[in-house]
Amino acid sequence: MSLNFSPVPFDLAAGFTHWLVIMVAVLALSFVLAIVISMLTLGFAGPVEVVVHSAGAFSDFLGTSPRRCLALTTLTFREAVRRKTLWVFAVFAVLFLFAGWFMSEATPDPDLQVKNYVSFVLRTINWLILPVVLLLACWGIPDDIKVRSLHTVVTKPVRRHEVVLGRIFGFAAIGGLVLVIMSAIGYVWINRQLPQAKGAQLIARVPVYGEINFLDNEGKPTKEGINVGDEVMFRSFIEGNTKARAIWNFSNLDPSRFEGQGRLVLESSFQSFRSHKGNIERQLMCQFTLINPKTKLRVPLKAFEVHEFRRNVYDVLAQNKTLQDEDGNSVELLKDIIQDGKLQVETACLSSAQYLGMAKPDLFVRLPDRSFAASYFKSITTIGLMMTMVVVLGVVSGCFVKGPVATMLTAFVVVVGKVAHSFLQSLVTGNVSYNPNVKMQGSGLFDSIYRIPTHLNPMVEIDNKLVGRVVSTLDNIELNALWAVQHMFPDFASFDTTEYVANGFDVPWAEALLPSLAITVGYCLPWILVGYFSLRLRELEAK
Amino acid sequence: MNHLTSQQRKWLYVAGIVVLLVPIIYLGMPPEPATARSGEISGGKLAELRLKDKLGESALGNVDPASSTMGLLLLGFRGIATSILWMDWQDQQRNKDWAALRATTESIILLQPHFLKVWHYQGWNLAYNVSAEWDAVADRYYWVKEGIKFFKKGRERNDKYAELYWYVGDTTGKKIGRSDEWKQFRRFYRSDPDVARFEGRPDPEVNPNGRDNYLEARDWFQRANETIDSSGNLEHIMAIYLFRAYPMRAEFDYAGTMQREGIFDEVCIEAWKTAFDDWTTKYGIMEFDCPIGSIHFEVTGDELDQMIAEEDAQNLTERDRKSYWIGNYQNQTNYRFWRLKSRVESEKEMAEAHREMYEGEQALHRADTAVARKLLWDGMSKYEKILEEYSDLKKEDETIDEALLALHGWRECVELDDEEIPDAYPLKEFWDLNPKRRETAKEEFNRRRRGR
């Protein structure tokens, strides 16, 4: 019942700097290209035109009128309603009416049941809302041009970017309305389907994660534990009754946020691996040792049985009447062990010749739970952000191509961003998507072209050093180009926060909401610029 | 056509529709639900053919509306959707995402409800692979149950496939009764560990009658045999003469497991008797095809003569050929062994011998040497006496192992009493003839002592 990935906090400053550099570079490149092309087509008047249009863009954006935008937004909203967009609710209702048919028999285990139902609702909303807003957004402006309603609009004192913004806000508003109603129905549906789970399973745990390090069987630091043969190497294992340890370093603990009066609750979800049958009626034993990183004071805690694939909640003060260091001296949790918000938790497997598997998210300090509703609606917010991106992309593509092409273009970007982004990333980085610890060999285009006819195994290095260098250089160029292509597609999968909610976690701000917001703003700003210039420079009579 | 008015054209269209409706109704009219169930032919030509050739979905088993809806909704994309689901399933198995895996399995069978191998593969995966991934025995049992329930569901959807009945029986018998956790699983089968849901009773979906797992398995194997007879569909798991033996094999397992659990009373003796009767009077008289015609296993010399006389009185080599094939098939099914074993085991003397050797070993593990020594000696003496009468059993592994275990126990008692092992003692020939197996038996003896 833990996450199968490590949530990484988004570094806003680094992300913003990165974005700014790329934006400036792309803008500069576009400006230079525009100058060159305009010179070739219009002569020396060309660059002047470019400068005039650029200056016009500045003045247009500075003179944005909220009233005009609002008017266009209202118009778009009404049009969308007239186009029977709200019929999507009928599909949604049918899905929920019959969902029981498909899901009731899946599993009676309450933990697993909650996960299935929550995933179903969030994924259904996700996949229903996107096609609706995609079609609306992509056909809006092309239809306006086709039926010439845009001609009437542009004769009014309306700036082109206000047309774009009005469309975006209008479609986003109707999408938002649909989303709000759908999510409310979904929330009620989950609560009605799982009435018995309300208390125990429908929760939003708030974890504080630490960084994980390992010690090997001899107690020496190592990058990771033992691989017991799992194909996915996200978790690694420590051997029981040896010096092997997994050590979590918590650096940002705030005892005032702990449960009750400074109660430290550790929650773990380790995997068990037996190298011999042992006593099958008992689970593997695990022991935590709390360490003060500054004073190196060590406080071993009472051992516990690991219930695999379940939540193992360990309330330190409830399960240890007194806390004693290794010399038997009584110590206080908040005074002697947690210092400046820092704490180390050392984990050992006590069962001889058996193994416990773990990764960073498998142990965390559990703060008081938040309500399930809060987590659920945060997840809906990320869906809303993704929907906004689809609206912006659809409207912008409708500014320079016709409806069907805009639809295909937007759908392509969404599908690649949602389904194939991790694949593209694995090609660029060489990391296998489901197994970041494994590097792909011979994945480059030219490398493969050389290896296939020569029957060279991907695990073997190319003998001929010259060929190897040439292949590697060409592949570097190609992979860099692919890197650029990859960044043209937003990572829509990162908007999917279903895993958090379905596993009973709160959707975190720094790890999930902030990156989604940053991606939305980061991509939408340049897209809106593209839409504005497309509409400003295009000939409206060209249907 | 251009000179026709709009109204004339419309009438023409109506006439065309009416004309086309005639063959459509003739071909495609659906059958009356009541007559379709009773097997009477009604409806259009296609419905008639479907019923006659048993091609309709209802002919295969219960129709699941969700599955049919999915099939219709996906139009021609069922294959693509199925492939995506299988890929998802693989990914979930790799990531140990059991909740999603279970849901995906359900989705797959919605799209492939009559694909026998899908049921087999997924049912096995739940009962064997997924269950083995969990550490707690109760959790493992939960997933074994999921596998059995899955097979049962498959059986409902495809009640003409004998294989699915067999899979239910096999998982109920073998997985519950022979895995590493067999002691716990057999206990859970009669009293589910999920006390909150079942209040100490068995899960009614897997054990509706609250019986022993092998008895439940026997009934499913029996239903598999009956399905072959009623549907005419062949099974594709193993040779038919092996397949047909499974209800009786479950009876042997039932009786044998009772002994393994230390039960040697009348119930156990009766179980062996029933198994013997069914083996010889039901399975033994079943007719099986072989290259020279039809044979059955329970056959005396006189019967063999009669069979040959009926077939060809002039063919002098026929007897040899017939007995060769009967012997051949008997070897494959271990017919003679089980016949002899069940017969011997249903004798009170044998049950007494087992009981004394078992209780002797238990007494030794309790360090009650005097009682252990006496019980073991008595049991070994009775065992030897029976084996003299049924000497064919002496070559069997089970017999040798049981004798060696008892001998290890008795010799330890003697040594603990500071006495020399006498020159003569019961079952001595087993000790002398199996020096290598003595070591293995010793390991097993020690393991059993530790496992107490």
Image (spheres, rainbow, N blue to C red):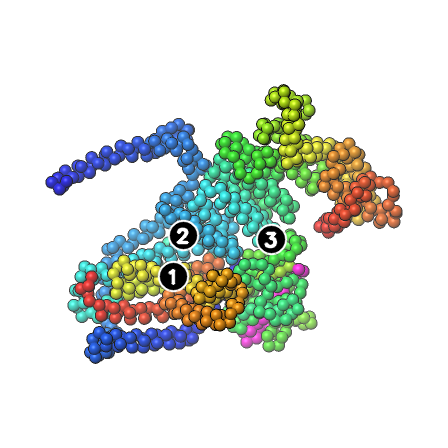
Q: If you read the primary sequence from the N terminus, does the residue marked by circle 1 or circle 2 appear first?
A: 2
- Is residue A142 positioned above or below B254 on the image? below
Subunit ID for the residue under disc 1: A
Residues at marks 3 and 1, CA–CA distance in whole angstroms: 41 Å
Residue A350 drawn in magenta: yes
Secondary element at image label 3: loop
Instruction: Give the residue number, with chain letter if any, for mark 2.
Output: A189
Secondary element at image label 2: helix
Determine whether label 3 and label 2 are within 8 Å by CB: no
The quadrant of the image that shows the C terminus of chain A is bottom left
Residue B396 visible in rendering: yes
Magenta residues?
A337-353
- Mark drawn on residue B136: 3
Residue at 41% in and 43% down: B67
Q: How many marks?
A: 3
- Residue A103 appears left or right of B198: left
The percent coordinates of residue B119 (x first, y second) are 50, 44
**Amino acid type for the residue under numbered disc 3:** Ala
Instruction: Give the residue number, with chain letter if any, for mark 1.
Output: A416
**Amino acid type for the residue under numbered disc 2:** Trp
Q: Nearer the viewer, residue A242 or A289?
A: A242
